[in-house]
Image: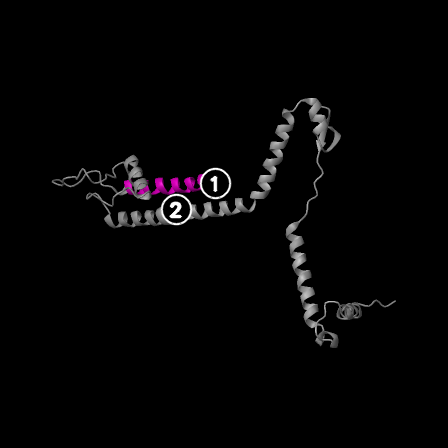
């Protein structure tokens, strides 16, 4: 999961990197004016290799915003450089962080299922390492004969009962809400107004009779 996020991020980043590098190289004037000295400490954007390297340094925070003086369109160069910094340094890196956090959250939700699967695979590997006589004694499950492409073969199966826990919990919440509504709508009986007695079962019997009478009636 994390590897797929990294691959998608790198594909988008490489497209932006080479695209802006080619645009900046196209703006460069290869023949600077006479008498202009070039500063060797400033980065040169004369070829695609050096431009790509300088833009990559800007992405990871190691580059310097020092521009060369022999630019043909300095305003367009500024616009491209600012757009590159906004799209890569701000948007793409934040998108990578968001994808990583979503992947970690999804893995944490499915961690129990993954753990059970890894545990069952480990048990099966340990079972295959046992001798044949011990394997027959310790093996649990149902053995059935299956018809495969290469012929018939006996396989061992485990019976697993699957429960849709999400649906079960949602139905349980509805049942609890209905019980709470029924209890709130019950009229206050005289027995309930009396002092409570732990050994007095009359209020409970009255409540049961009220539920029976308030239930749905069928007409024949």
Residue 48 falls within the magenta-colored stretch: no
Q: Earlier in the sequence, mark 1 or mark 2?
A: 1
Region of the chain picked out in magenta, as a range: 1-25
The vertical placement of 144 against 27, above or below, is above
What x and y, as percent, mark residue 56? Answer: 32, 40
What x and y, as percent, mark residue 10? Answer: 41, 40
Asked which secondary structure carries label 2, the reply is helix
Q: 165 or 66: nearer the eye?
A: 165
In the image, is 68 to the left or to the right of 151? left
In the image, is 45 to the left or to the right of 126? left
Q: Nearer the viewer, mark 1 or mark 2?
A: 1
Q: Which mark is residue 2?
A: 1
Colour pattern of the rendering: one colour
Q: Quadrant of residue 48?
A: top left
Give the Cα distance between marks 1 and 2: 15 Å
Residue 12 falls within the magenta-colored stretch: yes
The residue indicated by pointer 2 is 93
Q: Main secondary structure of the magenta part?
A: helix
Which residue is drawn at the image coordinates 69% and 22% (left, top)?
Answer: 132
């Amino acid at each position: 999961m994390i590897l797929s996020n990294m691959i998608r991020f790198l594909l988008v980043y490489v497209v932006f990197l080479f695209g802006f590098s080619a645009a900046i190289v196209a703006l460069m004037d290869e023949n600077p004016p006479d008498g202009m000295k070039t500063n060797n400490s400033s980065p040169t954007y004369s070829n695609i290799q050096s431009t790509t390297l300088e833009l990559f340094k800007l992405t990871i925070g190691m580059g310097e915003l020092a521009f060369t003086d022999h630019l043909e369109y300095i305003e367009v160069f500024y616009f491209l450089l600012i757009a590159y910094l906004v799209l890569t340094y701000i948007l793409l890196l934040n998108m990578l962080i968001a994808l990583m956090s979503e992947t970690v959250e999804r893995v944490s939700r499915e961690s129990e299922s993954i753990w059970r699967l890894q545990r069952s695979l480990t048990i099966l590997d340990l079972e295959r390492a046992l001798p044949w006589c011990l394997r027959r004694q310790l093996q649990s499950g149902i053995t059935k004969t299956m018809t495969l492409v290469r012929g018939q073969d006996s396989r061992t199966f485990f019976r697993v009962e699957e429960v849709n826990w999400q649906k079960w919990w949602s139905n349980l919440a509805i049942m609890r809400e209905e019980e709470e509504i029924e209890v709130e709508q019950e009229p206050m009986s005289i027995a309930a107004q009396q002092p409570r007695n732990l050994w007095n079962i009359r209020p409970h019997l009255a409540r049961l009779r009220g539920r029976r009478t308030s239930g749905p009636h069928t007409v024949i």
